[in-house]
Amino acid sequence: MIRNGGQVVYEAKGDTLVVRVGGEIDHHSAVAVRVGIDEKIAAERPGRVLLELSRVDFMDSSGIGLVMGRYRNLQKTGASLHINGAPPNIYKVMKLS
């Protein structure tokens, strides 16, 4: 799934789905991560999704696409997407996007 010991952990907290992602998000792993998140969102129907990225070591444009795609999908349902803990290198990539 996610390389370098990475993982995805889900936790429901009230109306919020917390998604903790670790490792590398690249073109090899982004599809599996996207499918997993989408399945959880469909099952839980949260009003808010919090992506916790503090344990992400690397993210390329596939990771940006993953985040932006979830943002667009959640907007259609009236839910919101929030990002927390992005390391400086990940934050820089996201800010440029």
Image (cartoon, rainbow, N blue to C red):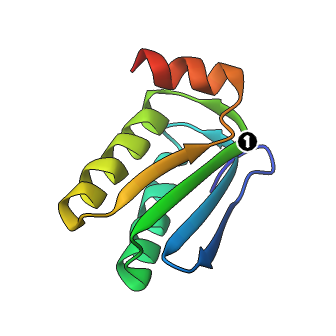
Reply above or below: 9 against 92.
below
Residue 91 coordinates in the image, percent (x, y): 59, 25
**Residue 87, picture quadrant:** top right
Q: Quadrant of residue 62?
A: top left
Looking at the rendered image, the quarter that the C terminus falls into is top left
Count of marks placed on residues:
1
Task: Tell me: 5 left or right of 45.
Answer: right
In the image, farthest residue toward the left: 76
In the picture as drawn, the residue positioned furthest to the front comes out as 14
Q: Is residue 84 above or below residue 87?
A: below
- Image coordinates of residue 4 in percent, x first then y, are 78, 43
Residue bearing mark 1:
54
Camera-side residue of 11 and 30: 11
Q: Tag 1, which secondary structure?
A: strand
Q: Residue at x 54, y 44 (%)?
A: 83
Residue ranking furthest to the bottom:
43
Horizontal arrangement in the rendering, residue 85 relative to residue 93 (left or right): right
Residue 53 image offset from top left, x and y in percent:
65, 44
The residue positioned 52% from the left and 20% from the top of the image is 93
Q: Amino acid at mark 1?
A: Ser
Q: Is 78 on the left or on the right of 17, as rendered?
A: left
- Nearer the observer, 55 or 14: 14
**Is 70 located above or below residue 90 in the figure?**
below
**Quadrant of the rendering where the N terminus is positioned:** bottom right
Q: Position of residue 88 (x, y in %)?
A: 69, 21
Indicate whether 91 appears above or below 62. above
Determine the residue positioned at 54% across, 36% down. 26
Q: Residue at x 59, y 78 (%)?
A: 12
| Front residue (pair 65, 26) | 65
In the rendered structure, the answer to whether residue 58 lies left or right of residue 75 reads right
